[in-house]
Image (tube, rainbow, N blue to C red):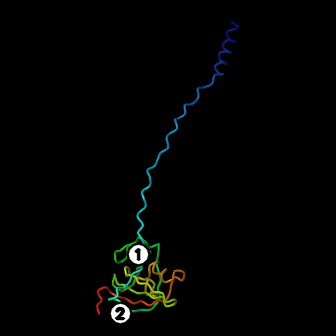
Amino acid sequence: MRRLPALLLVTALAGCATQPPPPVLPRPQQPVIAPPPAPPPPVTAPQQPRTIPPQIFAAGPFFTDEGLASFYGRAHSGKPTASGKKFDHRDFTAAHRTLPFGTLIRVTDLANGRTVTVEITDRGPRIPTRIVDLSFAAADALGMVEKGVTRVRLEAFRADQRD
């Protein structure tokens, strides 16, 4: 009988010495492969500087003005203009308070003599002391980007203008 408690003790201790089975690890999942990204929208080439047809240019401007010009750029790209066209800072366009949409204006920087021809597509400028807001492309062609504002002469021509 003395052996029974010893046998129970040995059996109990032997049960403590066994290790639990190893945990079952989940199988590694295959990496999720995302579909390729959609291609970027096509980039349209910037407009070339506009030119005034010779027959219209020969008739002379129907409107002239001198004053300050400013420009607006990338922050407005893609937004609709007052004419309904989407603004693109790379196009040769401008905003004027009263000239009809589609009017071509020759803008001359009075400080350096550079000229550029733009189309009126928007209303502005909102600052009362300025007479025109140019697109970034037009401002860059005039060499006024670093200055921000420059004195200009406007000469307006219409496609339906006749001698």
**What is the quadrant of residue 62 in the picture?**
bottom left
Left or right of residue 145, residue 61 in this image = left
Q: Position of residue 84 (x, y in %)?
A: 34, 75
- Image quarter where the N terminus lies is top right
- Residue highlighted by disc 1: 47
Mark earlier in primary sequence (1, 2): 1
Q: Amino acid at mark 1?
A: Gln
Picture disc at residue 60: 2
Q: CA gap, disc 1 to disc 2?
A: 25 Å
Left or right of residue 162, residue 150 in this image = right
Q: Position of residue 35 (x, y in %)?
A: 43, 50
Seen as rendered, the residue at the extreme top is 1
Kind of element beneath mark 1: loop
- Image quarter where the C terminus lies is bottom left
Question: Where is 156 relative to 121, above or below?
Answer: below
User: Which residue is at the front of the view, 48 or 68?
Assistant: 48
User: Which residue is at the front of the view, 15 or 46?
Assistant: 46
Question: Which residue is found at the position 38% from the left and 81% from the top?
Answer: 119
Q: Residues within 10 Å of mark 2 (few under 14, many from 20)?
A: some
Kind of element beneath mark 2: loop
**What is the quadrant of residue 124 in the picture?**
bottom left
Question: Which residue is found at the position 49% from the left and 41% from the top?
Answer: 30
Question: Where is 42 relative to 73, above or below?
Answer: above
Q: Position of residue 153 (x, y in %)?
A: 44, 90
User: Which residue is at the front of the view, 13 or 161?
Assistant: 161
Question: Which residue is found at the position 45% from the left and 80% from the top?
Answer: 138
Q: Residues within 10 Å of mark 1 (few under 14, many from 20)?
A: few
Q: Amino acid at mark 2?
A: Gly
Question: Where is 37 relative to 100, above or below?
Answer: above
Question: Which residue is found at the position 50% from the left and 87% from the top?
Answer: 150
In contact (CB < 8 Å): disc 1 and disc 2? no
